[in-house]
Image (cartoon, rainbow, N blue to C red):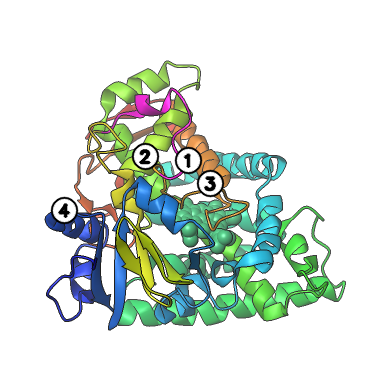
Amino acid sequence: MTFPALKTVDSTMALLRDPYRYISRRAAERGSQTFETRLLMRPTTCMTGAEAAAVFYDPKRFQRAGAAPPPLQKTLFGQGGVQGLDGTGHRQRKAMFLEIAGPERVAALADLVTCEWRRAIPEWAAAGQIQLYPRLQVLLTRAVCEWAGMPLPDADVESRTRQLSALFDEAGHLGIGHLKSRVARKAADQWAVGIIEQIRADELDPPHASAAYVVAHHREPGGDQMSSRVAAVELLNVLRPTVATAVYITFVAHALDAEPAWRERLAHGDGGEDLAFVEEVRRHYPFFPAVAAIVRDDFEWRGHRFTRGRRVLLDLYGTNHDSTAWRDPERFNPERFLGAAPDRFAFVPQGGGDAALHHRCPGEPIATRLMMVALDQMVRHMTYTALAPSAPVDFRRLPALPSGGYPIQVAATNGGHTGA
Ligand code: HEM
């Protein structure tokens, strides 16, 4: 049996017009979780839903080497990093990330980020109207560089923030945005190579638990260190996505406005429901649209043939909204996270499966913790007015954000929130 095929020459533009909903909408039109199309001029199989995710994360069926589209390797991911590894090489590299994002390290980062919020709130109040998203990028850049053992003089904060942010905020754009992201990648790689080489030459001695130290001294399966170029890519694989948490934090703010009853409930609660709220933000809001892999050897699933070498995309946003796994999936409802842990192939905002064995993101504990720190600050320690509180989310932007950014007016510390 063959897949339902779309009668289009190349669907790249259709995907870019609706990057988060393209796969699930086309799949629904065809009445199948799987369909074939052409993307970037290459035959591509698209899959959506929890059952498809369980197949996609089977390393016997899929590999990652050669899967990432070249434009994203030159911007978002960098070249030679963990995203393109398979087998033992992947597991050993992945163990390094799980060490970097271990519980004590996450707690240390959360403390630094909390200090940065305390420093930022009076500055934002003094500035009058601000855009929350770019301010969060600065706050997170400062905190993650200190935590990761990366020296960051005050004079460089703005430029490093711009560089790290361009790696994820411009990478999915066409034209000038993509070029900016490529320039940022070159500069950031150079910066991180310099730090790795200084550590290896004993000219810089960051704390031994810090990301910079761990990456500089990590050993590959054969016992060698990574080249300084690949080590730099991996160090940026920690810094860049931590700054990208600014996207999720902006959505936490958006959700607090959209759900005033929940804001009240959290403000008067003991913090026990904060995690459920941020998990629902990660399920409900768009961030990373899809992930790519390559079929290892021919196989059949549900009567459909997957041929060796075929590129396959798994729809993350659509899987988080799949009505066979989620009741009333379009409704924002944190209560769905108050019970048992969600299925690891149904809840996939940062990939599915097991982070130690599969390509699932190792940074979920970091993202959720920094979102909880932000929620605590916004609900319990900051008085602000959202100036466009119900702005629709711009689903064409990559990553998506509330239209018009997220402007706020910060009034004072230690208060609550007022609607516009
Ligand atoms: C800001 C929120 C974040 C989002 C939306 C996100 C999303 C993702 C996604 C979708 C993947 C790919 C999963 C796959 O290929 O199957 C991934 C992988 C990865 N993420 Fe995150 N991530 C975030 C935060 C972080 C943080 C804070 C770190 C810092 C350690 C991190 C480090 C990584 C790494 C190293 C990988 C590659 C893992 C592998 O290939 O095995 N991410 N992330």
Question: Which of pointers 1 and 2 indicates the residue nearer the eye?
Answer: 2
Image quarter where the N terminus lies is: bottom left
Choose the circle earlier in sequence order: 2 or 4.
4
Measure the C-alpha gap from mark 2 to mark 3: 13 Å
> Mostly what secondary structure, the magenta segment?
loop
Q: Position of residue 60 (x, y in %)?
A: 53, 62
Provide the residue span drawn in magenta.
Answer: 332-345
Instruction: Please say if 255 is above or below 20.
Output: above
Are discs 1 and 2 less than 8 Å apart at CB? yes
Task: Determine whether label 2 and label 4 are within 8 Å by CB.
Answer: no
Name the quadrant containing residue 166.
Answer: bottom left
Task: Find out whether the residues at labels 4 and 1 contact each other: C-beta distance under 8 Å.
Answer: no
Nearer to the camera, 301 or 321: 301
Q: Quadrant of the C terminus?
A: top left
Distance, label 4 to label 1, CA atoms, is 36 Å
Q: For ligand 1, tell me if the residue under mark 3 lies within 8 Å.
A: yes
Query: Which residue does the image show at 61% across and 52% down from the upper left?
Result: 143
Residue 377 position within the rendered picture, expressed as x and y whole percent measured from the top left: 48, 33
Q: CA distance from mark 2 to mark 4?
A: 28 Å
Q: Amino acid at mark 3?
A: Glu
Could you tell me how far apart the alpha carbons at marks 4 and 3 are, in whole angstroms? 32 Å
Give the labeled residue for mark 4. 31
Front residue (pair 264, 289): 289
Q: Give the secondary structure at mark 2.
A: helix
Q: Is residue 381 visible?
A: no
How many C-alpha atoms fall within 10 Å of the one at disc 2: few (<14), some, or many (≥20)?
many
Which residue bears the numbered disc 3?
364
Q: Is residue 339 left or right of residue 189?
A: left
Number of other residues with Cα within 10 Å of mark 4, as a class: few under 14, some 14 to 19, many 20 or more: few
Residue bearing mark 2: 281
Earlier residue among tags 2 and 3: 2
